[in-house]
Each structure stands twice: as structure tokens, then as C-alpha cells.
Image (spheres, rainbow, N blue to C red):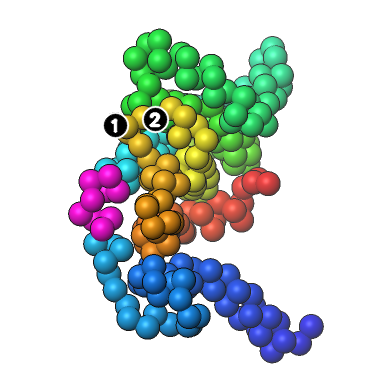
Amino acid sequence: MNVNVSRWILVAYGLYLFLPLYWLMSMALRTNADIVGEFSVFPVAPTLANFREIFVNPVWYQAFGNSLSYVAINTLISLAVAIPAAYVFSRYRFLGDKQLFFWLLTNRMAPPAVFLLPFFQLYSAIGLFDTPLAVALAHCLFTVPLSVWILEGFFSGVPTELDEMAQMDGHSFIYYFFRVFLPVNRGAIGVTLFFCFMFSWVELLLARTLSGAETKPIVVVMTRTVSASGLDWGLLAAAGVLTVIPGVLVVWFVRKHLVKGFALGRVS
């Protein structure tokens, strides 16, 4: 295919991907009357009132804080559990290792709705309901198996000779693991962090069921932007713009490791 034609195809596809984001931002800068009124490509009278409402209304900014808290907890727990588990699966063979690895993946195959009632009853009984930890632990049921699967693919690509060389040089396992092995697999950790964050950030069903008035996440608040005059389109669009920013920041900070990880690892 001609290089110029390929370039124009990529440009057209990029504009196609950018269009929803632009329109979301455009709606966030309009009033409801402007949105439901006459069609216009650009805001007729741009306003920051929708963003101001989010930053001054405790319902909105507390919801953002609740979401960020359980997403951070989930990501940290998933990495802390998955990294040593993936190392064991990649370096050792033991009775039932393949069956255990497959069982981890079956948890990821199940829809979240299957676990709603067990989680709700369990957390209510032990006083964990309506806390960020409750949502984070529920998400771990899905992010930990995914993290183990991703990391095992990367770790298996690291030659075992590296372990043997570190042992011959007199390094302890702790030193080797944290100062040699993990830095070599920075790309793997970046990819895993990305997937854990994105799953927990956009998941709605578990977050909505396991949270109450105290820890209501942003995805739940966004589904309740209905007033007496109808759906508040501008406010919902402004919240949508702000919810995109954390994902963009995560991709930005791990972009180098992410690209390297996708190039060297096994993710599908």
C-alpha cells in the first residue's frame, strides 16, 4: 500500500478516535439548554460551571476520592500477591501446578454478577461493607488471576541462568529478586499495573453493590445525575472528562514500560 495512503488512513482513524473525546469535552463546556438546543460544533457560550460543580460539591469530589482509594488498594494488593505467585509458576514445577494455574484463570472467566450475593453477605457479616477495602478485595478476585497470568508469561521469558549467576555471585535471594529480577521485568509490572488499574477504575457492578452512602464511587454517582428537569448532560460530561484523566496519567507514567512490555510479553 502507498505510504501516503497509509498515512491518511491513520490520520482518519485518529480523528475518528478523537471525535468522542472532543464531543465529551464540548458538552462539558455547555449548559443543558445549549446541549439540547440547536446543533453546533463548538460551544456557543463556553462555561466552566459544570467543572466547578464537581469541585465544590462534596458528593462528586468525595466519589472521586473513594474510587481512587479502592483502585490504588486493589492495584497494590494484586501486584503484591501476583508477583511472587508468578515467579513460583515460572520457576518451579510441583504437583497440580497446571491445574492451579488454570483454576486461577477460571475465576477471571466468571462474570462479576456471580459473586455479588456472596460478597454482599460476607462483607455485611464482618462489617466490611461500604468500605474501599471491600470493593478492592472483590476486584482482586479478577485482577489477581489476570496479573499472575500476565506476569508468568514475562517471567518465563527470563533465563534461569540469571538466577544461577546471582547465586554463584553470592547474592541472597531477596537481593537478587528485588535488585535484579524485578528491574529486569519493569515492563511486565507496567503492563500489569495498567490492566489492574483499568479494570478496577471502570468496573461498575461490584463497586455499586458493595458501596453505600459513605464510599460511593464516581461510576455510581455518574449514573444518578438526574434532577427534576431531567438528565444533567453537562455535569455528566464534565465528570466523564475528569474520569478519563487518571487513566491518561497512568498510561503516561508507565508508557515506556508499557510499550516494552507489550513488545516482549504475552498478553492477549
Residue 44 in view = yes
- Quarter where residue 110 is shown: top right
For residue 86, above or below residue 153 = above
For residue 103, above or below residue 160 = above
Relative horizontal placement of residue 106, taking residue 161 as reference (left or right): right
Residue carrying label 2: 211
Q: Position of residue 34 (x, y in %)?
A: 40, 75
- Quarter where residue 160 is shown: top right
User: Foreground: 219 or 44?
Assistant: 44
220 is within the stretch colored magenta: no
Residue carrying label 1: 214
Quarter holding the N terminus is: bottom right
Task: Give SS at disc 1.
Answer: loop
For residue 54, above or below residue 156 = below
Q: Position of residue 84 (x, y in %)?
A: 49, 27
For residue 143, above or below residue 228 = above
Q: Residue furthest right?
A: 1
The magenta stretch spans which residues? 53-61
Which residue does the image show at 49% across and 45% down from the upper left? 202
Prevailing SS of the magenta stretch: helix
Which residue does the image show at 23% across and 46% down from the upper left? 58
- Quarter where residue 132 is shown: top left
Please state which amino acid type lies under the numbered disc 2: Ser
Which residue does the image show at 28% across and 44% down from the upper left? 59
Relative horizontal placement of residue 163, taking residue 109 as reference (left or right): left
Please state which amino acid type lies under the numbered disc 1: Glu
Q: Are marks 1 and 2 in contact (CB under 8 Å)?
A: yes
